Image: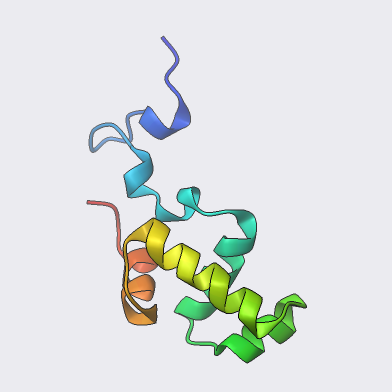
């Protein structure tokens, strides 16, 4: 039986979406999250992506909600932490 990629064995038990935080995000949110996790301010992220700072702020808050984090430090940790 072929299992969906998010449920396939990876040597440590079944892989689930909760182990892949970036999978929960839209492509735009992934770009913003990656840049924010590197410590870039809203204005720089916005300039680099051709968006307004308000759009970046809104996308980053959506990322925080989807990943269950409260700030950039927690976001950086979540994105860099190996799956449990």
Q: Taking 34 as reference, is 82 left or right? A: left
Q: Position of residue 43 (x, y in %)?
A: 64, 90
Q: Residue at x 48, y 82 (%)?
A: 38
- The part of the image, by quadrant, that contains residue 81 is bottom left
* Image: 22 above or below 1: below
Q: In the image shown, does 48 or 5 lie closer to the viewer?
A: 48
Up/down of 51 relative to 5, above or below: below
Residue at the far right in the pictured view:
50
* Quarter of the image where one finds residue 12: top left
Coordinates of residue 48 in the picture (x, y in percent): 72, 82
Q: Position of residue 45 (x, y in %)?
A: 63, 82
For the N terminus, the image quarter is top left
The residue lying at 38 percent from left, 74 percent from top is 76
Q: Nearer the viewer, residue 20 or 55?
A: 55
Residue at 32 percent across and 61 percent down: it is: 68
Chosen colour scheme? rainbow
Furthest toward the top, the residue is 1
Tell me where residue 13 sits by quadrant.
top left
Residue 59 locus on image (x, y percent): 56, 68
């Amino acid at each position: 039986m072929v299992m969906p990629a998010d449920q396939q064995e990876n040597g440590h038990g079944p892989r689930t979406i909760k182990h892949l935080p970036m999978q929960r995000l839209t492509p735009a949110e992934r770009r913003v999250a990656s840049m924010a996790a590197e410590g870039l301010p809203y204005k720089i992220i916005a300039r680099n992506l051709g968006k307004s700072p308000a759009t970046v702020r809104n996308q980053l808050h959506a990322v925080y909600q989807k990943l269950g984090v409260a700030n950039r430090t927690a976001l950086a940790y979540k994105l860099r932490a190996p799956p449990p």
